[in-house]
Image (cartoon, helix red, strand yellow):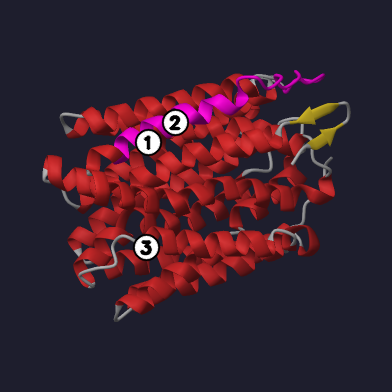
């Protein structure tokens, strides 16, 4: 897919591939991380939660900065550095002798993921007509979720046949491979206009309301990412190799089928409806009585999460415009990361202090709050800015 933006051509397929490879590495690491923490450090859900959350703390901090560099015409360098950081994070996780260095490695991997996505998506969307940005954002987001869906499967296969270390070697290789697609890609042209300095260059106006919705919605995904494997291992004595893949499969299905809904019905409508589906899925997981209902709830939650991000990005573009496209996407995606970052350690504490079902029920409550805020947002339409 190549998108024309005036006389400039956006290398959308190569950027999609770079983000896919980076998220294959991230997805594989999420599957292998609980076993590493338990085996090497004798840790439990709290340390796993903090390790998962550390990567998303890094993405939350680094995405607006990566977006700012993309707005300044440095998207190619940003994406290249992102792949290398993901690889370095993989090396750190393979070799970490203690939990502190493991957390540092997770931070580097998160910073790499931030640079890959926040350098790529603004470049693509800036070259996309306004009436197609919803479906293009949805299509491009599949690069993340295809990686998240296949990464855990890859990790499970490698663990079974070659052992745990093989997973981390694959993570390192995938990070390096993520940097390669942009090596011979023409650099993004510098914009004719530049955004003003100050903190508004990193967090443009129009981000706060949809960003809050996204933050609350992402807490549910963070709970799934941090706790689903351990929950199935404890409650159902099996099936712990598939929960992230089931969740991501529901996500990818709706992304493929529903990408056009955002442009047709509007981001506000799609976001608020999707949040109700996510709420139902998380509630089903919390109330599940067997493996089948747990997996059904995870799939439903994935279907609900699927269109929340591209919907809120579309809403933000209406409010912030395209001059700060990179910063807007970076700040919005940071809201997503913050929710996941909080969900990791807080979900681990709730699971250890009460139980896993309570942790998922709490995530469902926050998703319900996001749905209410999304409905209220529908009463406050923004004037579109091109």
Q: CA distance from mark 3 to mark 2?
A: 24 Å
Any mark on residue 171, and which? 1
Which callout, 1 or 3, points at the residue further toward the start of the chain? Answer: 1
Residue position for label 3: 243
Is 215 inside the magenta-drawn segment? Answer: no
Any mark on residue 175, and which? 2
Region of the chain picked out in magenta, as a range: 167-195
Query: Do the residues under discs 3 and 2 have CB atoms within 8 angstroms?
Result: no
In the rendered image of this protein, does residue 155 appear above or below residue 114? below
Q: CA distance from mark 1 to mark 3?
A: 20 Å
Is 182 inside the magenta-drawn segment? Answer: yes
Within 10 Å of disc 2 (Cα), the crowding (few <14, some 14-19, many 20+) is: many
* Left or right relative to 193: residue 207: left
Residue farthest along the front direction in this orientation: 161
Query: Do the residues under discs 2 and 1 have CB atoms within 8 angstroms?
Result: yes
Residue at horizontal 57%, vertical 23%? 78
Q: Position of residue 33 (x, y in %)?
A: 27, 45
Q: Quadrant of the C terminus?
A: top right
Residue at horizontal 59%, vertical 38%? 17
* Left or right relative to 27: residue 260: right
Q: Position of residue 210 (x, y in %)?
A: 62, 51
Total residue callouts: 3
Residue farthest along the bottom direction in this orientation: 289
> Given this view, does label 1 or label 3 mark the residue nearer the observer?
1
């Amino acid at each position: 897919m190549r998108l024309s933006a005036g006389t400039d051509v956006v290398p959308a397929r190569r950027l999609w591939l770079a983000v896919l490879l980076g998220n294959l590495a991230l997805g594989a690491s999420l599957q292998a991380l609980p076993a590493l923490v338990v085996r090497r450090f004798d840790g439990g859900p709290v340390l796993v939660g903090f390790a998962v959350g550390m990567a998303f703390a890094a993405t939350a901090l680094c995405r607006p900065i990566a977006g700012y560099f993309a707005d300044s015409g440095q998207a190619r360098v940003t994406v290249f550095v992102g792949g290398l950081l993901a690889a370095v994070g993989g090396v750190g996780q393979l070799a970490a002798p203690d939990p502190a260095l493991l957390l540092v490695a997770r931070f580097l991997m998160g910073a790499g993921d931030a640079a890959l996505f926040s350098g790529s998506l603004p470049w693509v969307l800036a070259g996309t007509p306004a009436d197609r940005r919803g479906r293009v954002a949805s299509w491009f987001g599949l690069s993340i979720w295809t990686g998240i869906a296949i990464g855990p499967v890859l990790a499970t296969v490698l663990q079974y046949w070659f052992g745990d270390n093989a997973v981390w070697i694959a993570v390192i290789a995938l990070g390096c491979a993520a940097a390669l697609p942009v090596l011979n890609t023409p650099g993004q042209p510098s914009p004719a206009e530049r955004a003003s300095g100050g903190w508004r260059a990193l967090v443009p106006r129009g981000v706060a309301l949809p960003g809050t919705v996204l933050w609350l919605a992402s807490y549910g995904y963070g709970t799934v990412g941090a706790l689903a494997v351990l929950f199935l291992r404890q409650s159902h004595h099996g099936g712990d190799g598939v929960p992230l893949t089931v969740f991501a499969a529901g996500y990818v299905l709706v992304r493929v089928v529903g990408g056009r809904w955002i442009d047709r019905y509007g981001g506000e409508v799609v976001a608020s409806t999707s949040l109700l589906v996510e709420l139902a899925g998380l509630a089903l997981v919390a109330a599940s009585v067997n493996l089948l209902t747990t997996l059904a709830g995870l799939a439903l939650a994935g279907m609900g999460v699927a269109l929340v991000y591209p919907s809120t990005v579309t809403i933000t573009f209406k409010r912030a415009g395209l001059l700060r496209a990179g910063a807007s996407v970076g700040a919005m995606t940071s809201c997503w990361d913050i929710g996941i970052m909080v969900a990791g350690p807080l979900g681990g504490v709730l699971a250890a202090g009460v139980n896993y079902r309570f942790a998922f029920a709490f995530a469902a409550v926050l998703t319900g709050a996001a749905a209410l805020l999304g409905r209220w947002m529908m009463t406050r339409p923004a004037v579109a800015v091109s």
